[in-house]
Amino acid sequence: MLHSRFVVPGSRCVAHAAFSDRWGGYSLPPYSSLNLGRGVGDDDAAVAANRSLLAQALGLQSDRLSFTSQVHGTAVHTVDLDALSSSVPLTAVEADAQVTRSHHLGLAVLVADCTPVLLADPEAGVIGSAHAGRIGMSRGVIAAAVAEMRRQGAEQISAIIGPSISPRNYEVPAEMRAEVAAGEPVTASVSAAGAPALDVAAGVAEQLRREGVRLERWVNACTYDSPDLFSYRRDRVTGRFAGVIWMEPADTP
Protein backbone atom coordinates (compact mmCIF):
# COMPACT_ATOMS: atom_id res chain seq x y z
CA MET A 1 0.00 0.00 0.00
CA LEU A 2 1.42 3.35 -1.08
CA HIS A 3 0.38 6.29 1.11
CA SER A 4 0.97 10.03 0.79
CA ARG A 5 -0.29 13.13 2.56
CA PHE A 6 -1.20 16.49 1.06
CA VAL A 7 -0.09 18.92 3.77
CA VAL A 8 -0.27 22.71 3.53
CA PRO A 9 1.08 24.35 6.72
CA GLY A 10 -1.71 26.13 8.57
CA SER A 11 -4.47 24.44 6.55
CA ARG A 12 -7.61 23.34 8.31
CA CYS A 13 -7.52 19.95 6.55
CA VAL A 14 -5.06 17.18 5.76
CA ALA A 15 -5.70 15.05 2.69
CA HIS A 16 -4.48 11.46 2.51
CA ALA A 17 -3.91 9.47 -0.68
CA ALA A 18 -3.31 5.73 -0.95
CA PHE A 19 -2.99 3.06 -3.65
CA SER A 20 -3.72 -0.56 -2.88
CA ASP A 21 -1.90 -3.56 -4.34
CA ARG A 22 -3.37 -6.96 -5.22
CA TRP A 23 -2.47 -8.90 -2.05
CA GLY A 24 -4.06 -9.72 1.30
CA GLY A 25 -7.67 -10.18 0.24
CA TYR A 26 -10.28 -12.90 -0.14
CA SER A 27 -10.59 -13.31 -3.92
CA LEU A 28 -9.51 -16.54 -5.58
CA PRO A 29 -7.49 -16.82 -8.80
CA PRO A 30 -7.48 -15.22 -11.31
CA TYR A 31 -8.62 -12.31 -9.10
CA SER A 32 -6.23 -13.09 -6.27
CA SER A 33 -6.53 -11.61 -3.93
CA LEU A 34 -7.48 -8.02 -3.04
CA ASN A 35 -9.74 -7.41 -6.03
CA LEU A 36 -11.88 -4.32 -5.39
CA GLY A 37 -13.79 -4.26 -8.67
CA ARG A 38 -17.30 -5.53 -9.20
CA GLY A 39 -18.45 -6.58 -12.65
CA VAL A 40 -15.22 -8.36 -13.58
CA GLY A 41 -16.43 -11.89 -12.85
CA ASP A 42 -15.30 -12.20 -9.23
CA ASP A 43 -17.52 -13.37 -6.38
CA ASP A 44 -19.41 -10.35 -5.07
CA ALA A 45 -19.09 -11.44 -1.45
CA ALA A 46 -15.31 -11.58 -1.80
CA VAL A 47 -15.25 -8.11 -3.35
CA ALA A 48 -17.40 -6.72 -0.51
CA ALA A 49 -15.04 -8.28 2.04
CA ASN A 50 -12.04 -6.83 0.22
CA ARG A 51 -13.57 -3.37 0.24
CA SER A 52 -14.16 -3.66 3.97
CA LEU A 53 -10.51 -4.67 4.42
CA LEU A 54 -9.42 -1.62 2.44
CA ALA A 55 -11.58 0.73 4.52
CA GLN A 56 -10.18 -0.77 7.72
CA ALA A 57 -6.60 -0.36 6.48
CA LEU A 58 -7.28 3.31 5.71
CA GLY A 59 -9.00 3.96 9.05
CA LEU A 60 -12.36 4.61 7.42
CA GLN A 61 -15.79 3.10 8.02
CA SER A 62 -16.74 0.58 5.32
CA ASP A 63 -19.72 2.70 4.24
CA ARG A 64 -17.48 5.75 3.88
CA LEU A 65 -15.78 4.53 0.69
CA SER A 66 -17.43 5.94 -2.43
CA PHE A 67 -17.18 3.78 -5.57
CA THR A 68 -18.79 4.59 -8.92
CA SER A 69 -19.54 2.69 -12.09
CA GLN A 70 -16.72 3.87 -14.36
CA VAL A 71 -17.62 4.17 -18.05
CA HIS A 72 -14.61 6.04 -19.55
CA GLY A 73 -16.59 9.29 -19.59
CA THR A 74 -16.25 12.75 -18.06
CA ALA A 75 -19.14 12.83 -15.58
CA VAL A 76 -18.20 14.08 -12.10
CA HIS A 77 -20.07 12.69 -9.07
CA THR A 78 -20.32 15.15 -6.17
CA VAL A 79 -20.47 13.23 -2.90
CA ASP A 80 -21.93 14.78 0.24
CA LEU A 81 -21.61 12.59 3.31
CA ASP A 82 -24.61 14.22 4.98
CA ALA A 83 -26.83 13.45 1.99
CA LEU A 84 -25.87 9.81 1.46
CA SER A 85 -28.86 7.47 1.36
CA SER A 86 -28.65 3.72 1.81
CA SER A 87 -31.47 3.36 -0.73
CA VAL A 88 -29.23 4.67 -3.53
CA PRO A 89 -25.99 2.60 -3.72
CA LEU A 90 -22.98 4.62 -4.75
CA THR A 91 -21.99 1.81 -7.12
CA ALA A 92 -25.06 2.65 -9.23
CA VAL A 93 -23.71 6.10 -10.10
CA GLU A 94 -22.03 6.26 -13.51
CA ALA A 95 -19.10 8.65 -13.24
CA ASP A 96 -15.35 8.66 -13.83
CA ALA A 97 -14.54 11.41 -11.34
CA GLN A 98 -15.67 12.27 -7.82
CA VAL A 99 -15.44 15.39 -5.68
CA THR A 100 -16.31 16.04 -2.04
CA ARG A 101 -15.94 18.56 0.77
CA SER A 102 -16.77 15.93 3.42
CA HIS A 103 -14.28 14.66 5.96
CA HIS A 104 -13.65 10.95 6.61
CA LEU A 105 -15.07 9.99 3.21
CA GLY A 106 -12.86 8.11 0.77
CA LEU A 107 -13.20 8.69 -2.97
CA ALA A 108 -12.09 5.52 -4.76
CA VAL A 109 -10.98 5.08 -8.36
CA LEU A 110 -10.53 1.53 -9.71
CA VAL A 111 -7.91 0.65 -12.31
CA ALA A 112 -6.00 -2.20 -13.91
CA ASP A 113 -3.90 -0.23 -16.45
CA CYS A 114 -5.75 3.11 -16.67
CA THR A 115 -4.33 6.12 -14.83
CA PRO A 116 -5.71 6.90 -11.34
CA VAL A 117 -5.50 10.57 -10.37
CA LEU A 118 -6.03 11.90 -6.83
CA LEU A 119 -6.53 15.64 -6.28
CA ALA A 120 -6.63 17.87 -3.23
CA ASP A 121 -6.78 21.44 -1.99
CA PRO A 122 -6.38 21.01 1.79
CA GLU A 123 -6.68 24.75 2.43
CA ALA A 124 -10.06 24.96 0.70
CA GLY A 125 -11.14 21.55 2.01
CA VAL A 126 -11.91 19.98 -1.36
CA ILE A 127 -10.69 16.64 -2.73
CA GLY A 128 -11.29 14.71 -5.94
CA SER A 129 -10.44 11.55 -7.85
CA ALA A 130 -10.44 10.69 -11.54
CA HIS A 131 -10.24 7.55 -13.70
CA ALA A 132 -8.23 8.49 -16.78
CA GLY A 133 -7.81 5.79 -19.36
CA ARG A 134 -7.07 6.48 -23.01
CA ILE A 135 -10.68 7.42 -23.75
CA GLY A 136 -11.40 9.39 -20.58
CA MET A 137 -8.13 11.31 -20.82
CA SER A 138 -8.91 12.20 -24.44
CA ARG A 139 -12.45 13.25 -23.62
CA GLY A 140 -11.36 15.57 -20.80
CA VAL A 141 -12.11 13.88 -17.49
CA ILE A 142 -9.19 15.68 -15.80
CA ALA A 143 -10.45 19.13 -16.79
CA ALA A 144 -13.97 18.17 -15.69
CA ALA A 145 -12.80 17.06 -12.24
CA VAL A 146 -10.66 20.17 -11.73
CA ALA A 147 -13.52 22.44 -12.86
CA GLU A 148 -15.90 20.89 -10.32
CA MET A 149 -13.34 21.21 -7.53
CA ARG A 150 -12.91 24.89 -8.35
CA ARG A 151 -16.66 25.35 -8.45
CA GLN A 152 -16.66 24.10 -4.87
CA GLY A 153 -13.97 26.55 -3.80
CA ALA A 154 -10.64 24.89 -4.61
CA GLU A 155 -7.88 27.27 -5.71
CA GLN A 156 -4.48 25.63 -5.13
CA ILE A 157 -4.94 22.04 -6.29
CA SER A 158 -2.23 19.38 -6.06
CA ALA A 159 -2.32 15.93 -7.67
CA ILE A 160 -0.84 12.46 -7.41
CA ILE A 161 -0.71 10.24 -10.50
CA GLY A 162 -0.88 6.58 -9.53
CA PRO A 163 0.47 3.39 -11.15
CA SER A 164 -0.65 2.74 -14.73
CA ILE A 165 0.54 0.93 -17.83
CA SER A 166 3.72 2.38 -19.29
CA PRO A 167 4.13 3.13 -23.00
CA ARG A 168 6.72 0.37 -23.32
CA ASN A 169 3.85 -2.09 -22.79
CA TYR A 170 0.93 -0.19 -24.35
CA GLU A 171 1.16 -0.94 -28.05
CA VAL A 172 -1.70 0.41 -30.19
CA PRO A 173 -2.41 0.67 -33.92
CA ALA A 174 -0.65 3.58 -35.59
CA GLU A 175 -4.01 5.14 -36.47
CA MET A 176 -5.08 5.12 -32.82
CA ARG A 177 -1.81 6.71 -31.70
CA ALA A 178 -2.24 9.44 -34.31
CA GLU A 179 -5.85 10.07 -33.26
CA VAL A 180 -5.03 10.39 -29.57
CA ALA A 181 -1.87 12.42 -30.19
CA ALA A 182 -3.81 14.86 -32.36
CA GLY A 183 -5.51 16.01 -29.17
CA GLU A 184 -2.63 15.39 -26.75
CA PRO A 185 0.73 15.27 -28.56
CA VAL A 186 2.78 14.13 -25.56
CA THR A 187 0.97 10.77 -25.56
CA ALA A 188 2.64 9.58 -28.79
CA SER A 189 5.28 7.00 -27.94
CA VAL A 190 6.82 3.67 -28.90
CA SER A 191 6.78 0.34 -27.10
CA ALA A 192 9.76 -1.71 -25.98
CA ALA A 193 9.46 -3.55 -29.29
CA GLY A 194 9.50 -0.31 -31.27
CA ALA A 195 5.80 -0.44 -32.17
CA PRO A 196 3.39 2.54 -31.94
CA ALA A 197 2.36 3.09 -28.33
CA LEU A 198 0.60 5.55 -26.06
CA ASP A 199 1.69 7.24 -22.84
CA VAL A 200 -1.63 8.04 -21.22
CA ALA A 201 -0.08 9.11 -17.90
CA ALA A 202 2.03 11.70 -19.74
CA GLY A 203 -1.15 13.07 -21.28
CA VAL A 204 -2.68 13.29 -17.81
CA ALA A 205 0.39 15.11 -16.47
CA GLU A 206 0.25 17.60 -19.33
CA GLN A 207 -3.45 18.24 -18.77
CA LEU A 208 -2.86 18.83 -15.06
CA ARG A 209 -0.13 21.34 -15.95
CA ARG A 210 -2.46 23.20 -18.31
CA GLU A 211 -5.12 23.33 -15.61
CA GLY A 212 -2.67 24.90 -13.18
CA VAL A 213 -2.55 21.84 -10.92
CA ARG A 214 0.71 21.13 -9.11
CA LEU A 215 1.97 17.56 -9.56
CA GLU A 216 2.81 16.39 -6.05
CA ARG A 217 3.88 12.88 -7.00
CA TRP A 218 3.95 10.59 -10.03
CA VAL A 219 4.20 6.96 -8.96
CA ASN A 220 6.85 5.24 -11.08
CA ALA A 221 5.25 1.79 -11.42
CA CYS A 222 3.96 0.01 -14.52
CA THR A 223 0.91 -2.17 -13.94
CA TYR A 224 1.90 -4.53 -16.75
CA ASP A 225 5.39 -5.09 -15.36
CA SER A 226 4.50 -5.31 -11.67
CA PRO A 227 3.27 -8.66 -10.27
CA ASP A 228 1.90 -6.71 -7.30
CA LEU A 229 -0.67 -4.86 -9.42
CA PHE A 230 -3.58 -5.92 -11.58
CA SER A 231 -3.19 -5.45 -15.35
CA TYR A 232 -5.97 -6.07 -17.83
CA ARG A 233 -3.63 -5.98 -20.82
CA ARG A 234 -1.32 -8.55 -19.24
CA ASP A 235 -3.94 -10.96 -17.85
CA ARG A 236 -7.29 -10.03 -19.47
CA VAL A 237 -9.33 -11.75 -16.74
CA THR A 238 -8.18 -10.00 -13.59
CA GLY A 239 -9.14 -7.73 -10.71
CA ARG A 240 -8.87 -4.03 -9.99
CA PHE A 241 -6.79 -2.11 -7.47
CA ALA A 242 -7.75 1.30 -6.08
CA GLY A 243 -6.53 4.80 -5.56
CA VAL A 244 -8.30 6.44 -2.62
CA ILE A 245 -8.22 9.99 -1.33
CA TRP A 246 -9.81 11.19 1.91
CA MET A 247 -9.63 14.20 4.16
CA GLU A 248 -9.47 14.87 7.89
CA PRO A 249 -9.40 18.00 10.03
CA ALA A 250 -5.82 19.13 10.58
CA ASP A 251 -6.12 18.60 14.34
CA THR A 252 -7.06 14.90 13.98
CA PRO A 253 -4.61 12.75 16.00
Image (tube, helix red, strand yellow):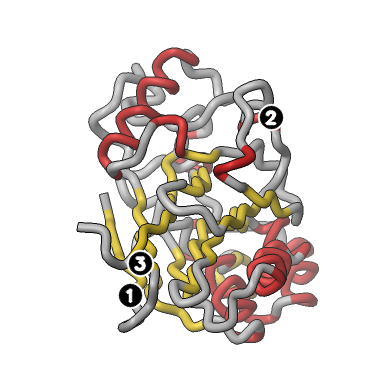
Secondary structure at badge 1 equals: loop
Q: Which residue is mark 2?
A: 92
Which residue type carries mark 3? Val
Query: Residue 14, labelled with which disc?
Result: 3
Crowd tier of the residue under label 3, counting other residues whose Cα lies within 10 Å: few below 14, some 14–19, many 20 or above: many
Q: Earlier in the sequence, mark 1 or mark 2?
A: 1
- Please name the residue shown 59% across and 71% down the image: 204
Which residue type carries mark 1? Val
Dividing the picture into quarters, in which one does residue 53 lie?
top left
Q: Quadrant of the C terminus?
A: bottom left
Which residue type carries mark 2? Ala
CB under 8 Å between callouts 1 and 3?
yes
Crowd tier of the residue under label 2, counting other residues whose Cα lies within 10 Å: few below 14, some 14–19, many 20 or above: few
Residue 4 location (% of width, % of height): 30, 64
Q: Which residue is mark 1?
A: 7
Residue 86 location (% of width, % of height): 60, 24
